[in-house]
Image (tube, rainbow, N blue to C red):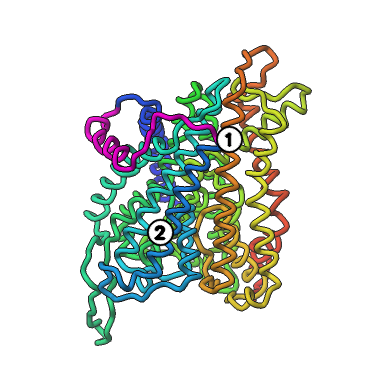
Amino acid sequence: MSLHIWIEFLIFSGILIALTPPVGRYMANVFLGQQTFATPILGWLETITYRVSNVNYKIEMNWKEYAKALFLLNLFGFLFLFLLQLIQYYLPLNPQNFPGVSWDLAFNTAISFVTNTNWQSYSGETTLSYLTQMLGLTVQNFLSAATGMATIIALIRGITRKTVETIGNFWEDLIKSTVYIFLPLSLIFAIVLAGEGVIQSFSPYVEVTTLENAKQTIPLGPVASQIAIKQLGTNGGGFFNANSAHPFENPTALTNFLETLALVLIPAALTYTYGIMIGSRKHGWLLFLVMLVFWVFGVGISYYAESVRDPILEAFPVYEGVETRFGTFGSLLWTVSTTGTANGSVNAMISSLAPLTGGIAMFNIMLGELIFGGVGVGLCSMIMFVLLTVFLSGLMVGRTPEYLGKKIEKREIQWVMAAILVPGILILLGAGISSVLPVALSSISNQGPHGLSEILYAYTSVAGNNGSAFAGLNANTVYFNLTLGIVMFVARIAIIFPSLAVAGLLARKKVTPLSAGTFSTNTLLFFILLGSVIMIVGALTFFPALALGPFVEHLLMLENRSF
């Protein structure tokens, strides 16, 4: 690495680490019901929201009631967004007179944004009206992120409470997340982005004459307001087809730095929130460190892969697919961060990066969106692995596994295994079936291992609720819109419902006093065990598929062979 790359990496890492405690402490105060600087400013909005929605936030829910409320909200959001796309032609704020979206694409997009996946089988600037982008997509960006936040808060309550049936009130957690966290941060960030050149306009598209005397249409729209929550809520759905490689979404080196930071900030800070709420900041920092190590290794391997000379292209360094405004490292830092956090936004063409870089991006998602993961659900995934590690450690030493004083038994581990294994099953089944069906193969643009990677990445992205695209795959077909949409829905349930079930089961348990035989979860040994379990599960599940895709493509590239 050159000196300026080291400086950029260290500054980014340093700011992330420095912001984790204050942001994490603020979120903990919000959910613990403590006074914050935002309470006198936004408290009225919280109160009005309760009254308008007729929600009794004082009634506590058990995990099944919590899950039911969560499901009903998201079901309504899906139906509303689905219908909004179908009838957008007849609605206002459609200066380009875009027609209604086809039913299969509307189905896919509605599920995508409701589940915080934000997979996009369409080109935003040529498909969706301003109203659909704002009232449909942007609103769901807030609600899906708040849903994930509510899930982790409920899980934390289940871990910390004892001998009770309830884990909080979903509506209160949802509204607090939106009012005190996502709304103010997004407002501030949108103003910063607009000041740096991200457009925010309701004007119709503009037709200009280029220097070659050709006509070009310049798309406009309310972009800054969507991009702010897109990054902060680990959503990733761009206003434009080029996503964050588009100069109207990401115009300068400063916006690139800030948007990259924004997509990891809240997931990273949640580890500190977790530490405060369970009464062990040391344990919260340990989880943060595990995530950070995986992230650092991902950045390092990706940079190495891009530094290997490609004999096929006979160029070094290779800039194909890289956003030249930000350089290779700026694109790699974003790629590793967005696939680790379930954000899914991109500022480079992942398909055009080195095969190993694409493999790292894919593996990040396959691990279960836990580096640093999506808002809320990323930490839920990490806690599932923590519980699995504690359970395996207990079996090895012949003791009943315990986590923070709660015994981890058969029923909890059954839910944990569902949360860990179901997304992997969806990835491998979806990619395996699609790799032999002519209707799916007709959509790939490359043969051989790269073609397999296109299909494998698509199902990995939606099963991990990430949403980024490998590119090269024409996913806007009835087959892919339906199958990818179903995988998105099932995968979202597969992490949220087990997390709430585990919360309910743990909330009923007594706390066992610590003893000399208690296995500490704040030690270097536990750090090593947790990282090892994550890697072993990931490798055993996905190594064969990765070996047939990006790994073998890397070896063939070194032999000057391509497809």
- The residue mark sitting in front, 2 or 1, is 2
Left or right: 118, with 401 as reference point: left
* Residue at 56% across, 46% down: 297
Write down the residue under mark 1.
383
Write down the residue under mark 2.
80
Q: Quadrant of residue 293?
A: top right
Residue positioned most to the bottom: 213
Report the Cα–Cα distance between label 2 and label 1: 33 Å
**Would residue 327 be seen by someone viewing this image from the given angle?**
no
Residue 47 falls inside the magenta stretch? yes
Highlighted magenta segment, given as a residue range: 36-63
The image quadrant where one finds the C terminus is: bottom right
Which amino acid type is shown beneath numbered disc 2? Phe
The answer to whether residue 560 is above or below residue 307 is below
* Residue at 60% across, 24% down: 508
User: Contact, CB < 8 Å: mark 2 with mark 1?
Assistant: no
Q: Quadrant of residue 554?
A: bottom right
Image location (x, y in percent) of residue 512 = 63, 16
Along the line of sight, the residue nearer the viewer: 3 or 392: 392
Which element is circle 1 on? helix
* Label 1: how many Cα within 10 Å (few below 14, some 14–19, many 20+): some
Which amino acid type is shown beneath numbered disc 1? Ile
Along the line of sight, the residue nearer the viewer: 394 or 300: 394
* Label 2: how many Cα within 10 Å (few below 14, some 14–19, many 20+): some
Q: Quadrant of residue 348?
A: bottom left
Residue 386 falls inside the magenta stretch? no
